[in-house]
Image (cartoon, grey):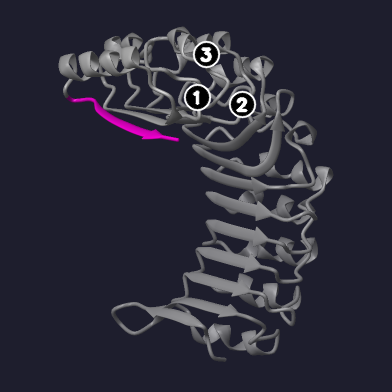
Amino acid sequence: MAANDLARDSDGGVTFLSFAMGKIGDADLEQLDRHPTLTRLRIQECPRVTDASLDRIAKLEALEQLELIRVPVSDSGIARLESAKALRRLALHHTSVTGAGLAPLAKLGLTDLQISGTGISREGLACVPTLTTLESLGLHLTSLPAEQWPPLAPLGRLRRLDLLTTRVSDAGIRVLDGMVDLSDLVFTTEAITDAGMEAIGALRSIRTLNLVDARITPSALRRLKDLSKLEVLELGPTIPDEGLRELPLLENLRELRLNATLMTGSSLDHLKTFKNLAVIDIRSARLSPTGKQVIADLTASRPEIRMVYISN
């Protein structure tokens, strides 16, 4: 059983194994019990690995992390992992799993779950909120928009949520209602308008927010007033020059990125009162002479602010 990659501990015990490109099948994985120190296992693009191997994998007492990528395992196989007592991180990318097999894993204490592919069903996704020990969750579900999901508020320990390839609309963002401790949110905002900003403004622990693609008006920026922990904010072309004045005082904002905005620079003096601001990044903008003078005055009064300006 030749691995594509492996790692050992200081005593020579194997702690990580990676298999890829069809090199192994179920019969090969019978040898896994030779590695009692194995903590991480990755299997990628191995079509001969089936549900039968999940029984064997579940018996690896030290296994903490399992990654299955383009492997034809199903819900039946995933459910067998309920006996993998040490398992904390699970990644299922482009498998045959619909999500129903996650239900038995609620007792495990998973802290990290990553799922991608088109096979996840609405019913299967209903199992995700039962995994209440999750701290990090990635749902890349191009065929299941967020408005069809169950509320995620039961995941009270969740700190990071990655929805980058999932369509999230004004209705879909409501699945995050009540998640006041969520600190890291990655999502595509092209379907977000002013109507969705109320839900975003209620995520009071958010540290980074990217609104580059959001179809919002300047007045929607007022919804951010309670995001006292926000450190990095990105705005896009729907915020014109004077629209920046609608941005409320965010006491912990460190970095402001203005992407492809109708920005002449004349409104940047509004940022003087943002006491922790360290970087202003203006991209694809058209600074006017007045704007350049405002920037000069701003950096003179606040020399700790670093200006980054990239013109078209």
Please tell me which of labels 2 and 1 falls first in the chain. 2
Under tag 2, what secondary structure?
A: loop
Secondary structure that dominates the magenta span: strand
Give the amino acid at mark 3. Answer: Leu
Residue under pointer 1 = 261
Mark 3 residue element: helix
Q: Position of residue 168 (x, y in %)?
A: 69, 33
Q: Quadrant of the C terminus?
A: top left
Q: Quadrant location of residue 267?
A: top left
Q: Could you say which is closer to the camera, residue 34 or residue 283?
A: 283
Q: Which residue sits at x=53%, y=45%?
A: 136
| 222 lies above or below 120 | above
Q: Report how many numbered discs are placed on residues in the image.
A: 3
For marks 2 and 3 on the same chain, the one whose residue lies earlier in the sequence: 2
When the figure is inspected, residue 223 is found, relative to residue 309, above or below; the finding is: above
Amino acid residing under circle 1: Thr
Q: Examine the structure image and report whether residue 3 is included in the region drawn in magenta.
A: no
Specify whether 5 is left or right of 42: left
The residue carrying mark 3 is 221
Q: Residue at x 54, y 72 (%)?
A: 41
Residue drawn at (64%, 67%) of the image: 68
Residue 61 visible in this rendered orientation of the protein: no
Q: Magenta residues, as a range?
A: 304-312
Q: Residues within 10 Å of mark 2 (few under 14, many from 20)?
A: many
Q: Which residue is mark 2?
A: 214
Residue farthest to the front, as pictured: 289
Q: Residue 310 in magenta?
A: yes
Three-letter code, disc 2: Ala
- Mark 3 and mark 1 lie on one chain; the one further toward the N terminus is 3
Image location of residue 120, percent across then percent down: 78, 51
